[in-house]
Image (tube, coloured by chain):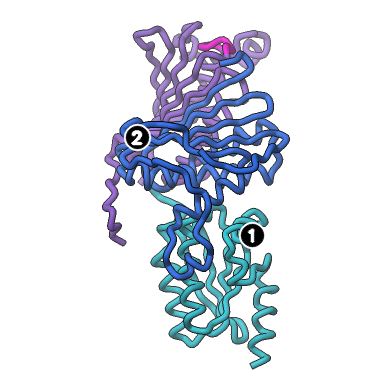
Amino acid sequence: MIDDELKVGTRQRDGVWIIDLEGDVTTFAEDAITSAYEKVTAEGAKYIVINSRQSDYINSAGIAILIGVVTEVNRQAQKLAISGLSAHFQKIFRMVGLAQYADIYAGEDEAVAALQKLVQAV
Amino acid sequence: MPDPQRPSTLGDEERVIELHLPSRLGYEKVAMDTASAMAKRMGFPLDRVDSLRTAVSEAVTNAIEHGNQHDSAMKVVVVFTGSDDGLIVDVADQGRKRLDEAATERLPNIQQVLQSDDKGGWGIWLIKELMDEVQFSVAPTGGNQLRMVIHLDR
Amino acid sequence: MSHNQVTIEIIFPSELGYEKIARDAIGTLARNMGFDAERVEDLRTALSEACINAIEHGNQRQAHLRIHITCTISRNRLVIVVSDEGLRFHPSTRLDPASMEQKLAGLASARGMGLMLIGQLVDECGFLPSRPGQGNHFRLAMYNPPRRSATNIA
C-alpha cells in the first residue's frame, strides 16, 4: 500500500540550514529525518530549522524521532527551531514539552529570522 | 529498515477494513471517507477516488433507505478489501426490502425517476457506470449484498 | 442500549498506517456530531495514538490480527473503545509520562508519550478491566460541551 511517505529535503538560507518535511512524520520517517540531520551537520550546520510542510499526520513515534534529533543538537551545541506545524500540532509539541528545547514558530520566515539573530551575534 | 520486533506483513486477502454503520442517513459519510482514505493510500488517481466516493455513497444510502428501511438499530456492513489488483467494496444490509436487480438493468428515464418515490434504481445505475465491476447477491439470511470492484491501472 | 444511542464499528488489520483510516472515520463522526474543529483534531490525534498502542503493544504488530473500534454515539457524548486481541496484556495504566528530560536522556518510550497525549486531549480515557487473553480495551470519551475529568485513569 502506498502511504503518505515522508519526503525530506535540505537547503540553506543565510547561514541557517532548513530541513523540509513533506508527508507523515511517523516511525517510518526515522531514516529520512536522521539522514537529513546528519547531512546538514556534516555540512557544518549550527542553526537548523525543521520545516514541516503542513504535515497532516504527526504521531508520538514521529515526535520521538524529533526528540532524538534534539538530543543530538544539544550534544553538538547546535540550535534548532521548528516551523510549519498546524495550530493543532504546535499545541501537541508544546504538550509533550518539545517547546522547551526547540522554539516553535508558525512560519519558516519567523524561524529563520530568529536563528539569524543568533548567527549575527556570533 | 528491519524492525527488531519483526512484525508480520499483510497478505493479499488480509487488507480488509470493515465498517458496521447504523441505518441512519448521514452515516454513509463515514463509509465514503473510509473509501477515499483507502483508495488514496493505494495510489488511485483522484478522479477514480471521487467516483468511488459517489458509488459508495449511493450503495450505502440504498442499504440504509431500502434494505434496512431507515431502522437505525439495523446495521449496514461495508467491507473494503485491498489488493495489488485493486479495491473491492462489499455493502450488505439486512434486506427488509429486496433489491430489484432487473430494475437496475434499464437506463434511467429522468422523467420517471423524478416522478417516482423510489429512486433506488437510479443510484444502482450510477454505481455501475462508476465502478469496474458490480455484482448483486442475496445473503442466506435474506440481506442484499452489493459488491463493487475498482481496478488499479498499471 | 438506549434508543437514543447508535453504535458504529470499525475493524482493521494490526498494521501501522491503518490508524489513519480509522482516524478519518472517527473525525467524520465527531464533525457530524457538532464537535468544534479543535476538538475534532484532538480526538483524531488521540484515536491515532490509541490505535498505535493497540497495534504495537496489544497485537505486537501482527498484521493478521485485528483492531476493533466500537463507537457509541449519544446526543452529547462520543465513546470509543479500541480493542486489540491482547497478545501483550496491559495490566495497569500509567498515564504520567517520563519527563522530557528523561526522554532526552533516551530513557522513556514513545508509547508513554502517546498515552499522556491521549489523557490531555480527551475528556475521559483508560483501560477497561479485562483478563489476559481477552484483549485490551482502551476507552476514550468526548463530551459536547467538554467535560474534563480530574484524572484520566483506568
**Residue B140 falls in image quadrant:** top left
> Quick one: which chain is cyan?
A
Q: Nearer the viewer, residue A19 or B84?
A: A19
How far apart are the alpha carbons under marks 2 and 1?
34 Å
Which hue belongs to chain B? Answer: purple
As helix, strand or loop, the secondary structure at mark 1 comes to helix
Q: Number of labelled discs? A: 2
Report the disc number at residue A90.
Answer: 1
Q: State which region is magenta.
A: B66-71
Tell me which residue sits at (43%, 46%) in the image: C53
Picture coordinates of residue A73, whole percent (x, y)? 50, 78
- Which of the image's four quarters has the N terminus of chain C? top right
Q: Nearer the viewer, residue B35 or B19?
A: B19
Which hue belongs to chain C? Answer: blue
Residue B78 in view of the camera:
yes
Q: Amino acid at mark 1?
A: Gln
Q: How many residues crowd around disc 2 within 10 Å: few (fewer than 14), some, or many (20 or more)?
A: many
Left or right placement of residue A38 versus residue A105 in this view: left
Left or right placement of residue B90 versus residue A74 in this view: left
Q: Amino acid at mark 2?
A: Glu
Above or below B18: residue B39: below
Above or below A22: residue C121: above
Predominant SS along the magenta part: loop
Residue B153 in view of the camera:
no
Residue on which disc 2 sits: C85
Above or below A113: residue C9: above
Tell me which residue sits at (46%, 82%) in the image: A41
